[in-house]
Image (cartoon, rainbow, N blue to C red):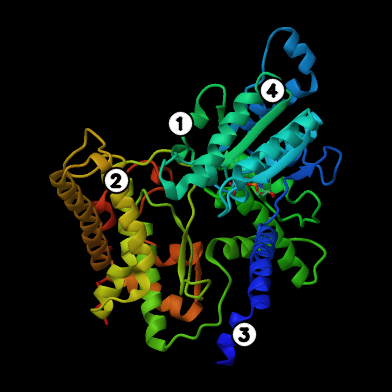
Amino acid sequence: MLHSAFLGDPNVITWIHDWVPLIFMGALVVLVGLTMRMIPRTRPAEIRPQETPPIAWGDIAGVDEAKDELREIVDYLRNSKRFRRLGANLPSGILLHGPPGTGKTLLAKAVAHESGATFFSQSASSFVEMFAGLGSARIRRLFKEARRHAPAIIFIDELDAIGTARSGGAANREYDQTLNQLLVEMDGFSAKGDVVVLASTNLLEKLDPALLRPGRFDRHIFVSPPDLTGRESILKVHSRNKELAADVDFGLLARQTSGLTGAELANICNEAAIFAARRDSDQIEMGDFDAALERVMAGVPTRRTLSEHERRVVAYHEAGHALCGELLPSVDPVHRISIVPRGVALGYTLNLPDEDRHLKTREELIDLMTMLLGGRGAEELVFGSITTGASDDLKRVGDIAYAMVHEFAMGNGIRSMKVAPETMSETTRRVRDEEVRELADQAARAARTILTAHRAQLDELASTLLTKEVLERPDLEAIMRGIPQAAPERRGSRHLGIAAATAVDPARPASAGE
Ligand code: ATP
């Protein structure tokens, strides 16, 4: 009763009438204010040329082609009048692409330093937020700032975060708007010519074609992992300020680090310095570099304790890899085998190439899969059962076999064309799946043949591993003495086939097994 009397009171009704809309509006304003405060504020990082530590051309090694291309841009930014007098315009956008850690960001910073231009750097992922329209506003602001400070360089890292092909779908509207804004801005300033846009990506093939057309990112510079001389120079660059012992051999280290990027090589130099400091030494020795190389390639040693049976399984698994690696001429020579758990691995076999390779034959890829399946093959042969330890090997075999069939048309059937997965008929898909399986099975059979034929060496490798835990190249050579192997000059260049790899040493009877 009291309740309805209260609501019936004309004063209360007037109060509600006057104040509730105001309170509601106030709450709305507070809510919008709070939401605005939650929006992350990202500003482009502005680096002035004179700021430290400056990156100069001398700090970057092993990417000479990319450096030569970019020197042209530096020349233009320094002497833009000379170029413009002759009607020459800068390319509007330069795209650095290549695997992660090859020095793309470093190159962009060196351009900024050497040209004396102000450098604005922003990661493309920081443009895009959940709030629609924010990404395009950020792009506008970035270009406005750069124009205000011309001559300037805008560097957009990880361009693929906004630059992948536009979907047109409602769910990706924010991405599409951000990309559209970037396209508009790039069209807008190209005539003025004193702002250069550099961008980097690991995924050139996924970028929207509109970004790559002439007038936008029309100059593409591939920044590849360094070759042998490049690796040696990068190691020297990153050891410049370090005290080195006389035994440090960068040539040897460069040979042992095929396929590694500049970032990984920089990491090895740093890890070597840490190892030397831990020894309380004043100088970094070759042993420190060796330990660093092992840590970077195989991971940090872990304290996992394995049962005696597990140790034996791991030893045979690694011995299986090593034996196949040693006997297959096209596989890189085995440098070290270890059953000390490191990172997620319980053991590892390190194969190091004698030289950089750019092409691989079908037979070489089958040999590589055979070596990868040698671990599981040994487990099966010796213990009659298989374990979960081969999961990484199996994944790599799957990837290689898939690429052989789908990318390189190296299967047993179709060898004359590549079919895109989206246009593949159901029948072709079935045929190709079958081809992938056949290749992997062929490698598994080859591994089994090698292991069975060289059972004595397999046993000896495994038992030596169980006692010493780590076998180096000379240990391996001692065990394999007398077995016909590929001559060093034939490794990596010619395929001798399973026949050579399975040639049994008549002096050694096959072991009875476990
Ligand atoms: P991401 O694609 O992942 O962004 P990135 O190609 O931009 O990688 P950077 O950030 O330029 O790679 O390189 C990382 C680090 O690796 C550098 O700071 C440097 O220490 C080292 N580095 C990479 N490449 C080189 C090189 N060519 N010369 C010297 N150092 C290098």
In this figure, which residue is indicated by the disc labeled 1? 209
Image location of residue 384, percent across then percent down: 23, 79
Viewer-nearest of discs 2 and 4 = 4
Q: Quadrant of the C terminus?
A: bottom left
Q: Quadrant of residue 389?
A: bottom left
Mark 4 → mark 3, Cα distance in angstroms: 83 Å
> Does the beta carbon of the residue at mark 3 sit less than 8 Å from ligand 1?
no
Image location of residue 282, percent across then percent down: 83, 64
The residue closer to the viewer here, 406 or 237, is 406
Query: Mark 3 and mark 4 in contact (Cβ < 8 Å)?
Result: no
Amino acid type indicated by mark 3 = Phe
Q: Is residue 293 above or below residue 123?
A: below
Amino acid type indicated by mark 2 = Met
Amino acid type indicated by mark 4 = Glu
In this figure, which residue is indicated by the disc labeled 3? 6
Which of the two labelled residues, at mark 1 and mark 4, occupies the earlier sequence position?
4
Mark 1 → mark 4, Cα distance in angstroms: 25 Å
Left or right side of 254 for 356: left
At mark 1, the secondary structure is: helix
Q: Single out the residue that lies furthest toward the top.
A: 86
Query: Mark 4 and mark 2 in contact (Cβ < 8 Å)?
Result: no
